Image (cartoon, rainbow, N blue to C red):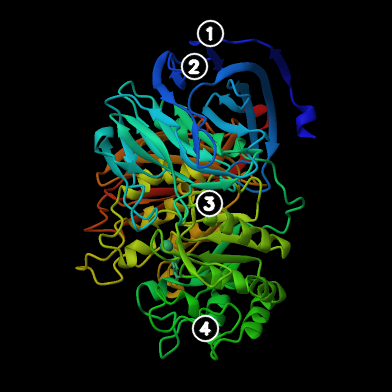
Amino acid sequence: MSFLRATIFSLVFLLAWHDAAAAVKVTSPDGKIVFTLQVMEREELRYSLSFDQQIIVKDSRLGLRFRQQAAFDRGFQIQQVVRAGYDDNWEQPWGERRVVRDHYNQLLIQLGDNSGRRFDLRVRIFDDGVGFRYEVPGQPGFQSVDIVEELTEFHLPEGSTAWSIPGRDYNRYEYLYKKTGLGDIRTAHTPMTLRTPNGAHLSIHEAALVDYAAFTLEQRRDNVFQTRLRPWSDGIRVKTAAPFKTPWRTIQVSGDAVGLLNSSLILNLNEPNSLGDVSWVEPGKYIGIWWAMHIRDRSWGSGPIHGATTAETKRYIDFAARYGFDGVLVEGWNTGWDGDWFWNGELFSFTEPYPDFDIHAVSDYARSRGVRLVGHHETSASVSNYRKQMGPAFDLYESVGVRQVKTGYVGDAGDIKRVDDNGVAHYEWHDGQFMVNEYLHSVQEAAKRKISINTHEPVKDTGLRRTYPNWLSREGARGQEYNAWGSPPNPPEHTAILPYTRMLSGPMDFTPGIFDLTFDGEQSEQRVQTTLARQLALYVVLYSPIQMAADLPENYEKRSDAFQFIVDVPTDWEQSIALAGEVGEFVVQARQERGGSNWYLGAVGDDTSRQLKIPLDFLPAGTTYTAQIYRDGPDAHWKSNPYSIVIEEKTVSAGDQLKLFLAAGGGAAIRLVPEVETRNGE
Ligand code: NOJ
Ligand code: CA
C-alpha cells in the first residue's frame, strides 16, 4: 500500500554504453551527496562518493569472486541504467521514532560482459547517506554459487580520525573502541565511524544482512578498506544460488556528529514488516536475576547460592509489580549450568528446570501480579544442541506465558559448534553465513509462538527489526556486565562512543541502572566508572525498546529518589532528536514518549567535566513543562564522588536554554512534563 501512495517517478535510459570510461551519477534528494560509478580503463568497476563537493570515498573497487565461475571483477560494461525516486513515510510498530521518512533517488545499473553474464548494482542515495548492493539474476552456470571474495572497497580520506573495534579477534564485538588515525587500523567491525579532515562524519556498515556473511573491514592499502566476508569453516564465504542479492553496503554521511544519530538509513534499507500483526511484541522494562551472578553474589549453577530459585524469583516479581516493571528475567533456572558452562554448552537442557525452580508456579505468580517471566536460552555456542531442542524450548515458554526470550551465544569467535548430519563438529563464526541464518531462524521460530527475542553474543545488527519486529534488541558490544568483571571495566567515554558507533546499527541491551557503583568496595578497580546520574541518562541515550533495571532490588530501594526516573522513563518513542555532541566526548539526546506528551532528555560526557547549554526549542511552543532534573552534584566525579546527585524541578518552555553540568564520567537525565497548555500557542 505504502508503495502505491508513494511519489514514484521512473525514467529509463536505454543506452548502449561501450565507452570504457563511462560514468553514471546519482545525487541525494538535497543534492549534497553524489555517487558515481565508473568503468575504468582496465574495465574495472569503481565508485566514488562526494559530500558538499568534497570526495569522501575515492575510486573504490567493486566486484565478486566465485569458486566455480569466472569473477565479476572486470570486463563488464554498463548496459542499461534505470533511475527512480521515492518519497514516503512508514510507521514502526515500536521504535525510536514512530514515523520514518524514506526518501531517496535510485540508480539501477545493469552490467554485462561479452559472454552474456550479468549483474546489477542497485544504489539508493538519501540525504543521510547511501546504500548499494549487488543483485545477481538467474543465468546459466549460476545454479550453485560459492562466493570466495567480495571486492567492495571504501577508499577513505587521508587524515581521517576513526572510532573502531578490531574485526577478527576472539571476543566478537566486545572491545573498547579506539580513536585512531586510519593508519592504525588493520581490521574493524562495522559500524566504523570516522571524521574526515573537513569535518564530515561517515559511518560504514551494512543493512539487511540475510543469508549472507557479515563483513569486516580490512585495510589493504593505505586508507583503502575492503569488505572481508566472514568465511564458513571450509573457507567458502557465502554459499548461494542465483538469483541472489547481497546486503546493502552503507555509508552514512553527515556534516556533524549528531547528524549520524538522527539517520534512519539502515532501517530504510530493510524490507517492511513480514510478520503482519505484531501487537504481541511488547517494548518495556524488566529486572532480573542477573547482576547478582555477575558480581558473584549468586550462581547460575545449583548449590547454596543458586540465583534462580522459586523464592528469589517471587521476590523479584513482587519488586517488579510494585514499581511497574513488565518482566523478570531469570537466568540459570534450567539444568546445564554446573561446572564451567562457558565450555559445556552441550549439557544445556532448555526445558528441564533445577529442582528448586518451579517454572509453572513462578510464571503463574508473575501473571497474577501483572508481570511476565522473561525467558533465557544460553547456548554457550553449542548451536546444534540448541537447534535440536528449540521447538520444545519455545513451546514451553509459550505455554507458561513468556513473551520475551533472551538468547545467548557465549563462546569465542570462530568457536560456534555446528554438528553436521554425520555427527561431525565444525566450528563457525558468530558472523558467518551459517550463524546469520541461525539467529534469524530462532527469531522466526519465536515469532510463530508470539515470542520476541533479545540476542546476546549476536551477529551485528543490520536493521532486521524492521522486517522481524519481534527481534527486539541485542547485545553486540561491551555492555554493563564488563563493569562487574571486565578488565578494565568500561571507561567513562565508552557510553559516549557507543551512540556514534554500535548504536547506529540498532538497539542495544546494554542493561543500565547500576546504583551500587562500588559493589566491590570503594578501593576496588572493579566498579562502574560513572556517576549515579549518568546511569539514569543511559536510559535515554542508549536506545532499546526493552531496558533493564540491572541492579539488585535492595539497591534501588536504598536510593528511591533517583530510582523514580527509572520507574518513569518509557522505552518506546514518538520521536527522537539528538541535539548536540561529538564522538566520544558527549551526547545530548531528546525523545518524546510514544502515545504521550512527556519528553525525556539524556546527556552523557567523557572523563572531563563540562557545562552544556541546551536550547529547548524541540519542545512545542506554547506549553510550559516541569523539568524533573537528575543531575550530577557540583562536587560529583565518577571516581571520588559518584553518588553526588541533585534532583530538582524547574519550569521551562521552548524558548529556554537549559544549563547542565556534567561531571567527569557524569550525566543528566530529565523528564519534561507539560504543565499548562495556553491557547493560541502563547
Ligand atoms: C552473556 C550475556 O551477555 C549475559 O547477559 C549473560 O548473563 C551470560 N552470557 C550468561 O548467559
Ligand atoms: Ca555478553
Sequence-wise, which precedes: disc 4 or disc 2? Answer: 2
Amino acid type, callout 4: Thr
Above-or-below relation of 256 to 283: above
Residue under the point 52% across and 27% down: 128
Which residue of the protein is positioned furthest toward the top in this rendering?
Answer: 19
Closer to the N terminus: mark 1 or mark 2? 1
Q: CA distance from mark 4 to mark 3?
A: 30 Å
Which residue is label 4 attached to?
A: 335
Residue found at x 60% / y 28%: 119
Which numbered disc, 1 or 3, marks the residue closer to the eye?
Answer: 1
Please name the amino acid that badge 1 sits on.
Answer: Asp
Q: Is residue 611 visible?
A: yes
Tag shown at residue 19? 1
Which residue type carries mark 3? Gln
Q: Are marks 1 and 4 in contact (CB under 8 Å)?
A: no
Mark 3: secondary structure: helix
Judging by the rendered image, the residue that carries numbered circle 3 is 433
> Is the residue marked 1 within 8 Å of ligand 2, measured from its CB?
no
Tag 4–tag 2 contact (CB < 8 Å): no
Who comes first in sequence, dot 1 or dot 3?
1
C-alpha distance separating marks 1 and 3: 38 Å
Q: Position of residue 247 (x, y in %)?
A: 56, 39
Q: CA distance from mark 4 to mark 2?
A: 59 Å
